[in-house]
Amino acid sequence: MRVLFVCAGNTCRSPMAAGLLRRDLDLLDLTDAVEIGSAGIACRSPGEGADARAARATLARGVDISGHRQRAFAPEDFHRFDLILAMDRETLVQLLELAPDGTSSKIRLLMEFARRSGRDEVPDPWAGASAEYELALELISAGVQGLVLELAAHCDQYSSSYSA
């Protein structure tokens, strides 16, 4: 299974989501079963690291994203990844507009997995203070927790059908 998180610049939300998912899958010993990536639909600084505020906020939760390097979303990502998760509706719309035939079903909002949050998108904290990063992390964490449950079920189905 291959999962790609997509936000605007690939500086804050998508690297935070990728880091949280890696941590949670590692706790379940499923890290090798899921390839995780992140990208920006409007990435302006490919190769640069994550926003320092995002890195500090995730590190406070025990997740180190200091090795992250920004990258732009590429058309081949539609074929490379099984699930493409947008952080907000604007990114979702952009992805759907770019999607080749037969790939739009892979594109969803991360917050679809956070059923009890009452939110449908993760606001971009980039221009904000630490409180905005904390809110983004809370929402991302809720989405990632729901996603982990689905991925774990998917991995169990795959391993039981594989061994049968």
Image: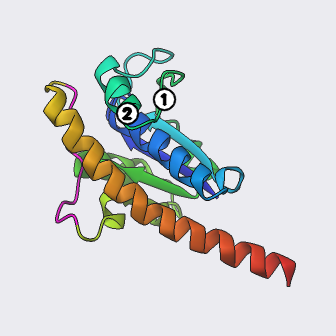
Q: In the image, which residues are magenta?
A: 117-126
- Seen from the viewer's position, the closer of residues 164 and 2 is 164
| Left or right of 71 on screen, residue 34 | right
Q: Name the kind of residue labelled 2 in the image.
A: Thr
Q: Choose top left, top right, bottom left or bottom right for residue 154.
A: bottom right
- Seen from the viewer's position, the closer of residues 146 and 99 is 146
Quarter placement of the N terminus: bottom right
Q: Where residue 64 is drawn, which disc sits there?
A: 1
Badge count: 2
Q: Residue at x 36, y 50 (%)?
A: 86
Q: Residues within 10 Å of mark 1 (few under 14, many from 20)?
A: some
Q: Residues within 10 Å of mark 2 (few under 14, many from 20)?
A: many
Residue 46: percent from the left, percent from the top? Answer: 47, 18
Which SS class for mark 1?
loop
Q: Residue at x 29, y 22 (%)?
A: 53
**On screen, 33 above or below 4?**
below
Q: Choose top left, top right, bottom left or bottom right for residue 76.
A: top right
Query: Can residue 15 be found in the magenta stretch?
Result: no
Query: Can residue 121 be found in the magenta stretch?
Result: yes
Q: Residue at x 57, y 45 (%)?
A: 36
Which SS class for mark 2?
helix
**Contact, CB < 8 Å: mark 1 with mark 2?**
yes
Pick out the residue farthest to the bottom.
164
Residue 149: percent from the left, percent from the top? Answer: 49, 69
Residue 129 visible at all: yes
Q: Earlier in the sequence, mark 1 or mark 2?
A: 2
Say which residue label 2 marks: 58
Q: Name the kind of residue labelled 1 in the image.
A: Asp
How far separated are the C-alphas under marks 1 and 2? 7 Å
Pick out the residue farthest to the right.
163
Residue 42: percent from the left, percent from the top? Answer: 35, 29
Quarter placement of the C terminus: bottom right
